[in-house]
Image (tube, rainbow, N blue to C red):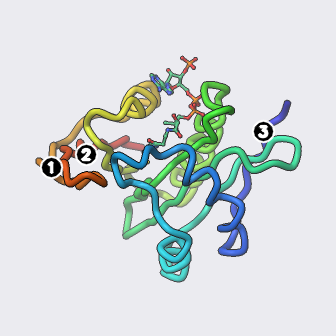
Amino acid sequence: MTVQVAERDAREIAAIMPIMESAFHPEYGEAWTAAQCLSLLATPGTSLITAEMGGVVTGFALTRWVFDEEELLMIGVAPEFQRMGIAGNLAARIIARAKASNRKRIFLEVRSNNPARHFYLQLGFADCGVRKAYYRGSNGNRFDATTMALDL
Ligand SMILES: CC(C)(COP(=O)(O)OP(=O)(O)OC[C@H]1O[C@@H](n2cnc3c(N)ncnc32)[C@H](O)[C@@H]1OP(=O)(O)O)[C@@H](O)C(=O)NCCC(=O)NCCS
């Protein structure tokens, strides 16, 4: 089935919340609330991109740009649709848009033990630093973050 990727506005937040709740493991406390998403999208330079299959929202990404840098804040795909190239489609849109806007790089931070790191590495992102104990999980545990960047 074809994946349709499109830029959306805050009206689409309700459609991404089930993915937010199912894709992000509660142990790590990484999922955002609808209010946090809404507040982000009220800020200039931010965007929500969704992936749909057959009219169903299966994945999303939230981004922000500052000067010549795009930041990939969050990307998630519904568990039953993972490993089908959906996040790859979302990333391709973000990279193409960043290049067309003359951004110099795409930056992100990710929990160091998140398998999503493999996803970023295969896109060409390289590690650029570690933030020790950056994330606090739901049980109080701390997790390192790795910062990664893709030069455009
Ligand atoms: C990370 C995530 C967005 C990837 O979405 P996806 O649609 O499954 O990714 P794709 O199908 O486009 O993957 C493309 C390639 O990335 C790599 N990859 C993706 N997920 C991977 C995983 N869990 N482990 C290892 N490699 C992975 C593989 O090379 C994959 O190609 P392959 O399936 O042919 O082996 C998804 O696993 C997810 O939603 N995770 C939970 C939320 C999260 O942690 N997001 C990142 C932090 S914001």
User: Quarter of the image containing the C terminus?
Assistant: top left
Where does residue 115 sit, x and y in percent of width and height? Answer: 39, 29
Residue labelled with disc 2: 147
C-alpha distance separating marks 1 and 3: 34 Å
Q: What secondary structure is found at the residue carrying circle 1?
A: strand
Q: Where's residue 132, x and y in %? A: 11, 47
Q: Residues within 10 Å of mark 1 (few under 14, many from 20)?
A: some
Looking at the rendering, which quadrant does residue 91 occupy? top right
> Disc 2 vs disc 3: Cβ atoms closer than 8 Å?
no
Relative height, residue 79 to residue 70 (above, below): above
Callouts 2 and 1 close, C-beta under 8 Å: yes
Q: Is residue 127 left or right of residue 132?
A: right
Q: Amino acid at mark 3?
A: Val
- Nearer-N-terminus badge (2/1): 1
Identify which amino acid the numbered label 1 is placed on: Arg
In this view, which residue lies farthest toward the left? Answer: 132
Q: Earlier in the sequence, mark 2 or mark 3?
A: 3
| Nearest the eye: 138 or 7 | 138
How many C-alpha atoms fall within 10 Å of the one at disc 2: few (<14), some, or many (≥20)?
some
The residue singled out by tag 3 in the image is 3
Residue 2: % across, % down: 83, 34
Identify residue for label 1. 131
Q: Residue at x 43, y 66 (%)?
A: 65
In the drawing, what numbered circle is on residue 49?
A: none
Task: Say which element carries label 3.
Answer: loop
Could you say whether the residue bearing mark 2 is in a helix, strand or loop? strand
State how far apart marks 2 and 3 are (Cα): 28 Å
Which residue is at 65% across, 46% downward?
59
> What residue lies at 23% left-to-right and 42% top-to-bottom?
146
Query: Closer to us: mark 2 or mark 1?
Result: 1
